[in-house]
Amino acid sequence: MLFKKIFATTLATVASFGCAATHAEMMTGPNIAFVGKVKSLDNIVKLEVEEKSWKCPKCTPQEQYVLEQIQDKTNIRDRNALSAILGNIKSESGFKAKICEGGARIKYRQCTSGGFGLIQWTSSGRYYGLGKFCKKYECDPNTLEGQTRYMINEPQFQKYLSEFENPGFSISQYMVPSYYWLGWGVKGYREHYAHEYAGKLVWS
């Protein structure tokens, strides 16, 4: 009776794995049948699943790069939060890396007054922070790539990051942490730009 139960269990195991096994193999237990199945996994094709994210097909390559990096390096997934950030960057620099306050298209060390770069780093601590960061992490303070890395890792952004990562708020509400992050003097068209981005972002 015990042998019938063991044999029935072995047959069920073999059937569940879809393996063909001889009577001798089945008599040694279900493990042999399972090993045969594992060997066949070598022929299975692996499928890669691409994670979805917010994309902006109608944006410039510079805007697309910053959008991608923000999502890649943080947990910001709310469209309005991302749009608020993009709108503020557009207002500050138009996504131009080598730009000094007033519109002069010059390099980092040549901008001796006013703000510089993506978010117009103005105070001495934030301006020189860009140079120190890029020296430490071997990036170029004149490039979009170097400035984006600094922007995301800068203490001022990290301080309010959790508020951007908290989903479900309006663009107007996300303008509050944006203000404390950037400390702008004039709001201007920031919120208008943010709404434009919200209309262009696509989840794909």
Image: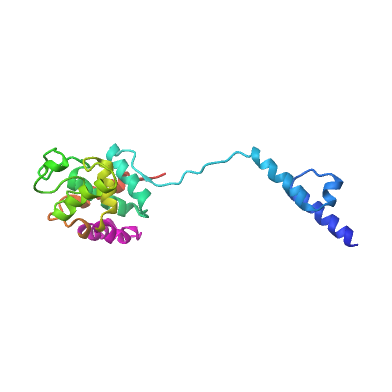
Magenta-drawn stretch contains 119: no
Relative to 127, is 151 on the left or the right? right
Residue 195: in sight, yes or no? no
Q: From the top left corner, tell me how far across and down residue 33 is, in percent.
A: 76, 48
Colour mapping used in the image: rainbow
Q: Which residues are magenta?
A: 156-179
Residue 97 falls in image quadrant = top left
Name, please, the residue furthest toward the right.
1
- Image point 24% across, 46% down: which residue? 135
Relative to 190, is 102 on the left or the right? left
Quadrant containing the C terminus is: top left
- In the image, 78 versus 159, the foreground residue is 159
Q: From the top left corner, tell me how far across and down residue 203 is, in percent.
A: 40, 46
- Image point 18% across, 40% down: which residue? 98
Secondary structure, magenta segment, majority class: helix
- In the image, 30 versus 162, the foreground residue is 30
